[in-house]
Amino acid sequence: MEKLKNIPWQEKPENCNTVMWRYSENPIIDRYTIPSSNSIFNSAVVPYKDGYAGVFRCDNKAVQMNIFAGFSKNGIDWEINHEPIDFKAGNTQMIDSDYKYDPRVVFIEDRYWITWCNGYHGPTIGIGYTFDFKEFFQCENAFLPFNRNGVLFPKKINGKYAMLSRPSDNGHTPFGDIYISYSPDMKYWGEHRCVMKVAPFEQSAWQCTKIGAGPIPILTDDGWLVFYHGVIATCNGFRYSIGAALLDENEPDRVKYRSQPYLMAPAELYELTGDVPNVIFPCAAIHSEKEDKLALYYGAADTVTAIAFGKLREIVNFVKNNSL
Amino acid sequence: MEKLKNIPWQEKPENCNTVMWRYSENPIIDRYTIPSSNSIFNSAVVPYKDGYAGVFRCDNKAVQMNIFAGFSKNGIDWEINHEPIDFKAGNTQMIDSDYKYDPRVVFIEDRYWITWCNGYHGPTIGIGYTFDFKEFFQCENAFLPFNRNGVLFPKKINGKYAMLSRPSDNGHTPFGDIYISYSPDMKYWGEHRCVMKVAPFEQSAWQCTKIGAGPIPILTDDGWLVFYHGVIATCNGFRYSIGAALLDENEPDRVKYRSQPYLMAPAELYELTGDVPNVIFPCAAIHSEKEDKLALYYGAADTVTAIAFGKLREIVNFVKNNSL
Amino acid sequence: MEKLKNIPWQEKPENCNTVMWRYSENPIIDRYTIPSSNSIFNSAVVPYKDGYAGVFRCDNKAVQMNIFAGFSKNGIDWEINHEPIDFKAGNTQMIDSDYKYDPRVVFIEDRYWITWCNGYHGPTIGIGYTFDFKEFFQCENAFLPFNRNGVLFPKKINGKYAMLSRPSDNGHTPFGDIYISYSPDMKYWGEHRCVMKVAPFEQSAWQCTKIGAGPIPILTDDGWLVFYHGVIATCNGFRYSIGAALLDENEPDRVKYRSQPYLMAPAELYELTGDVPNVIFPCAAIHSEKEDKLALYYGAADTVTAIAFGKLREIVNFVKNNSL
Amino acid sequence: MEKLKNIPWQEKPENCNTVMWRYSENPIIDRYTIPSSNSIFNSAVVPYKDGYAGVFRCDNKAVQMNIFAGFSKNGIDWEINHEPIDFKAGNTQMIDSDYKYDPRVVFIEDRYWITWCNGYHGPTIGIGYTFDFKEFFQCENAFLPFNRNGVLFPKKINGKYAMLSRPSDNGHTPFGDIYISYSPDMKYWGEHRCVMKVAPFEQSAWQCTKIGAGPIPILTDDGWLVFYHGVIATCNGFRYSIGAALLDENEPDRVKYRSQPYLMAPAELYELTGDVPNVIFPCAAIHSEKEDKLALYYGAADTVTAIAFGKLREIVNFVKNNSL
Amino acid sequence: MEKLKNIPWQEKPENCNTVMWRYSENPIIDRYTIPSSNSIFNSAVVPYKDGYAGVFRCDNKAVQMNIFAGFSKNGIDWEINHEPIDFKAGNTQMIDSDYKYDPRVVFIEDRYWITWCNGYHGPTIGIGYTFDFKEFFQCENAFLPFNRNGVLFPKKINGKYAMLSRPSDNGHTPFGDIYISYSPDMKYWGEHRCVMKVAPFEQSAWQCTKIGAGPIPILTDDGWLVFYHGVIATCNGFRYSIGAALLDENEPDRVKYRSQPYLMAPAELYELTGDVPNVIFPCAAIHSEKEDKLALYYGAADTVTAIAFGKLREIVNFVKNNSL
Amino acid sequence: MEKLKNIPWQEKPENCNTVMWRYSENPIIDRYTIPSSNSIFNSAVVPYKDGYAGVFRCDNKAVQMNIFAGFSKNGIDWEINHEPIDFKAGNTQMIDSDYKYDPRVVFIEDRYWITWCNGYHGPTIGIGYTFDFKEFFQCENAFLPFNRNGVLFPKKINGKYAMLSRPSDNGHTPFGDIYISYSPDMKYWGEHRCVMKVAPFEQSAWQCTKIGAGPIPILTDDGWLVFYHGVIATCNGFRYSIGAALLDENEPDRVKYRSQPYLMAPAELYELTGDVPNVIFPCAAIHSEKEDKLALYYGAADTVTAIAFGKLREIVNFVKNNSL
């Protein structure tokens, strides 16, 4: 991965006693940033050239969901294309795509892979790739519907591509656990294993209804650091918070540690109000192991995009010391 | 219709790129404006004498729903009666009315007709009239329960009164399409036709759960302009937005155009928070074709009343150019 | 009405202590009686010429619902047409009819009127007429959807046609009360009144979930005798039984008596098993006041057609003496 | 009860026309007041020594629910222990307690009794006591699951302890009425009576879905003053408001008066947004009959703790004059 | 307990390989056995004088639920009173009883105690007693609603009355575990303990939705033998089967053994069809330890009453050898 | 495939006018055929040596679901093993299998492949193989949960294994369409395509709720003949019927014909009553193209196993002539 010169960063506020803290100028991307948009959130960011590239979920004012490319020098100020990504055929004669949302992006070997929730008779995991964020290629869907939150590992594991996902149903799925699947070729998938399930209500209620992987896993000395969202069903709807887990490096279906407390939960006005109140949903993270910095991108209230920061080492230790 | 001297108006803000924009002093009517009220919203307004008269939904602090008359010189500052409208018998021996809400008002021929959601063993469409907004007469309900959002056309069509409505059920109806019915006499109704149904999720998700007519239709060169509310069911409840359609002048069950994007969706704090968050619900519009001005009255968060503005011609063109 | 020479009849069995009893050769019409049928039930019968004519609900083997004409000398052995009724336009340019089911037939003045549950964007009440059971004419639907069990009175009341119906929703409606509406012309309907609602569970549980009118009301010295179905929701589904009420002759929204016990409930194997177990559903009755005989036609298990008998006078007295 | 020197108080604002008003510095306890907390709300307060003691519901950042002791000089500024209450066995060999929430505290005879919602195979009513808010003892649960909002009377009635409660189910109970039960010994409970049920939607919709007792009842010349929460189910979730009732002094299952309008409903931003929007939930009140002052503690949005004030006499009269 | 001269009995059929078998003349009580009845089932039987007495659930033809006394010489042929039991006040000023169903009867010390599901603002456990099955006395309800299947132990345990029950909700409860409670005086109840919960679907699906105690527990050398019903929710409704458990004699909340396979499940036509198909529900057992005989009374399809037989010793061994 | 000497067969009854007919001695396998069984149904059969082998779903009396091998000379009289199949590792280190049900069996190239619904954190498609029906090997699950009705094609298509399946949820799935997926190696699966969806209610209601493939597809001159089950949701539960479709030989996601009427629907007592009434569910077919005979094995009422017969050519023509 390229050297990161400009990782977005702000030091921890003085009176802050939590392991992660919000950017003071949040949200960094407003809902109406491009002319057609109703909301911009749950989007992916990756270092690219001397800055950053991103794939953004922009719902338009017909509330159609699609993904758009964008670019930034500093990871905070973004130029987002006004037209959605136009895919060419990758390893498939082009399949239907009724909608696209919640993208993730990762560089593996020679290209940037994109996964997203793809509308094919219901939600499932779409896969595409690009070399330059200008030309994009779409591949076969990874799975049968219904599935959401497909997240690739940033390198092959035991010679195979590996993907986390969350089997779902065709509505506002009221359940959801994280699984892993493997592929020799990004076309055929198998060896499906359950990685982690929702927590018991009594032990960790913020993640008792459903969970799903967020940003691309980060390899640390303690294994793969996976940020994920957890959901509790209150009498006034779903509330999405953020936690993290550490998976075994070589057998990533083995959970070594998993945060019992959340790392972040909805608390700011731009998280508490919007199209879907009380949602924070992470889809990307930029980190520098050398500088021990991590910037986490998350959607807020299904409406805007925000950033939070943390020390990578502190986060790992927090997960280890507060494990379920 | 009387000449409009004082149509409420504010020019479009400079950086605004949408076809409609909000009044800067919204909300215009606070929830506690009259002593008994818990909320004042989803109300009807009509030019009257040298100003405006209105019929207002005021839920009291027992959360009983009723409608109240009110008056204004400028359409923005309102005096609302402290007692609800007391109806006398019109064309019926008085029928039960457990509650009244979401009124509309229209002048036809010689009098002001009022329709509302009337509680008769569940919600259905109540009809009444007044000549002076002092004495009110109640007629037979138009339909069997369950129905909501009964909206009269401002003139007879092919010699008959015409009414839009939305068949419903006895709860928080999770479905709803717009129908039209005709009556020779405002007492017996028939010739029911389906006008328009919810949109497919993939094409226009903001109106995929239910839709219902809003203000009295406005006759334009392109047919009847009908503002309507559209609803999407998110995992945190219903979200009500505003769109518009153009119906054929003489066969109003024929939809000529219908906005794929919404015209307005909840975005301001007084729309995002309140008794029912994320609701904007239009019930009345004042317009001047000559001045090409339109003021749209809408309830916000089922709590307060607000106004938005638009150029009538621009709105019509927007619907034609962005049709589903 | 024509003289009835051959009213179907069987004397009450000796050890029978109930007010109604079943025909010993039930069911009288098997599910596969015509080549295309999956089931024949919930059908209407009327004296015609020197025998009987009927309109039958026959669901075909694609489980499409339609209505068919049929004829019988004795009211028990039936010849049913193999093709469904083909309607011509009556008082409407022909409207959609996605399906037709649960017909009722009545002679008023000069013709036989048929009402049924008509599929027009959901169930509502279709109306048609015939003079000869060969040529049929379809009129405007009486109501907006959603409605079922539209049953005409056999003569005008206060100069207007009168119809009972049960407002419903768009699925397996879990609620339902009986209303009455009036029409001067069989085209426009109004003056809707609630006639009777479900009974409290503690008082009469068999009719605590929903109720709906069955055969054409029969005028007696004690008012209109209305057989109706009542439904209880058990943990294994809906159970449909049969009761009766007496409505005021001139103000038929006034209930004079209403049976607290059921008259009949599912008990025979052809009622307990079939496409929808535990359903008996009356749609027609033949009676002779002079002979004090009544034959009640009912669908059993949504699969076959059966008959039960009773003395008209005894039934009326039972309702009066066992009133809710 | 001890003399109250420092009852929290603020005079009614000039333009306020309601019987209760909020503290201008609300919320008094922030969600992050102690290091582990996600939220602090629905908590109990009682005069203690020359100030106040309290038992606080603090959900931690794993969203585990527990109760914590705290102390204050003035009832507004609180020191809350960082560790939850550690109970010793009272009249039981210690039973399971999966979680504890929504505590109430009352002094009877010689000690402070605490009741709360106790997790024992689902929610039921836990009972404990303390003499000094340092050492705490847990007793047998009052009832079988499922139950919530157990509230003791501040003295024995007819020689027996008396407790209000709300039978529930094992989820976000969509129903709920207030019952009373009696015990000779705080161990065995019986003589269960229904005290008051939800109100009909048409009469008082804010309390039409469920109701539950709040603070310890206050004995007045007009009987027991009981503040309670009432809930309405909107299409966007439950909304919790506050009302009051007056129960007969000696036969407290007899309701003398009950407020048709609410006393308070969610309206401030800290009530409209938070973990569970649109919730105000009272659990404690401090009053001085001599000074005619009452301070009501309530949880806001299941996130923070707030106070409202009222004149005791005015509140009682309001309930009497606006009774359902 | 009196000597049993005539315990109902039939030897095991030759080719039968199950531990229990049905009476060849089942059902023993038809649904129409008394004039008013719609169904007679879920009833209790106890040795009385030189024969048997019973308390029977007879739903009448209005489907009102009540309990009736009856008598038999041989336990198979029954005379059931035509009028329901008329209770006098026992230890309560008479409380409401909207309905009564599913009785159990047991002799303790000096009288016959009856428990049943009592309608008091929903189902809860009613208690009564009789000395002679002619005069009956009603006591306070044991618990707050909602509860069902209250079953007393036939002797005091540690000096207190003990009762099994199943906390429920106010509908067709889709959950249910068995608890025990104690009372010093049959008026106040406490010391509630969970006894056994539903089984995991993978281990014993017939009892994975809800379970509830059936007949009075039988003391054996291996502890209390408790027959209970278990329920699985199929896509076509609830299916009730019968199993058994052995509880510790002195600490009956301790389960020693519990049958993984059912003892009996619906299989005969009178169990598979009726008002509620696929229900067998045991409420009473007659046994003779000396003769090693047991006759189990159970309701079939919520319609009729049937008997099954088994060797007491074989049943106990079966439970021990096939324990969950 | 081996020559079939003894294909089970019975000529069409004389008065039968349907394309398929039942075996007169149905059911062929009773629910209690092996000592542990509660029910034997939804099972697979394949020609083997000079007779037939089968894999049977036998739920035991704990209602645990598992699959058992069995053998028959004539396809009608079966010997079923008393112990379930004990799998060894095939292409996986053995994964969890909480339960197994609804097996299918097919011979491809050198071995018999078995697929079934496998319990791995919910239902998904298990795969195994055997050479001799004595030793069995289990492979990786084909898909992530949740899935049911995985059915292999009897030969590779375009060089890859092909499997039909029905994505589901974790309960009594109320939706379901048929998809196809491909695999180069029986381990990794991809190229998922939707094959056919439920039919519109108005066109073919028996298959409007969900559909799922049944027996192994049969290659005919008109393409792949696929029997499938279709489900309608009545107010008394799901009703399962049987239809057939013809898929393109080389592009089997292309439907050429699909039966609008059902081929068979529940009508016999052993189909209408049992553990799950009104279910007929086909899992296997034996056919002889030369003799133009087909025997269809189906589960009845989730309780027993039955057979129906048809002329292969007639069935194909029926599907072509009655296509949706």
Image (cartoon, coloured by chain):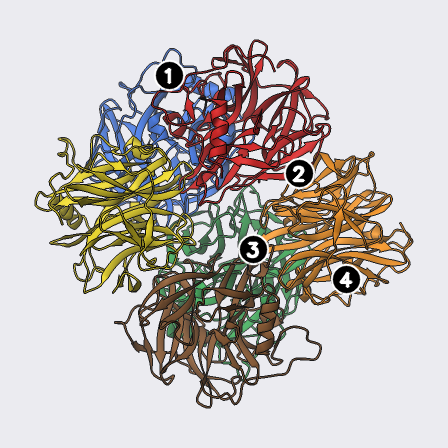
Chain colours: A blue, B yellow, C brown, D red, E orange, F green
Quadrant of the rendering where the C terminus of chain E is positioned: top right
SS label for mark 1: loop
Disc 3: which chain?
C
Q: Amino acid at mark 4?
A: Asn
- Residue hosting label 4: E81
Where does residue E187 sit, x and y in percent of width and height?
Answer: 74, 38
Which residue corresponds to the image point at 68% horizontal and 52% vertical from the top-left? E100
Circle 4 crowding by C-alpha within 10 Å: few under 14, some 14–19, many from 20: some
Please, what secondary structure does the residue beneath circle 4 have? loop
Q: Chain of mark 1?
A: A
SS at circle 2? strand
Mark 1 — residue?
A: A292
Disc 2: which residue: D192
Circle 4 chain = E
Whether residue E150 is situated above or below residue A287 in the rendered picture: below
Image quadrant where residue A303 sits: top left
Residue at 42% across / 56% down in the picture?
F177
Position of residue D186 measured from the top left corner of the image (x, y, whole percent): 70, 28
Q: Residues within 10 Å of mark 3 (few under 14, many from 20)?
A: few
Q: Are marks 3 and 1 on the same chain?
A: no
Q: Nearer the viewer, residue A300 or D51?
A: D51
Which residue is disc 3 drawn over? C200
Nearest the camera: F314 or B39? B39
Relative image position of residue A318 (x, y in whole percent): 47, 19
Closer to the eye: label 3 or 1: 3
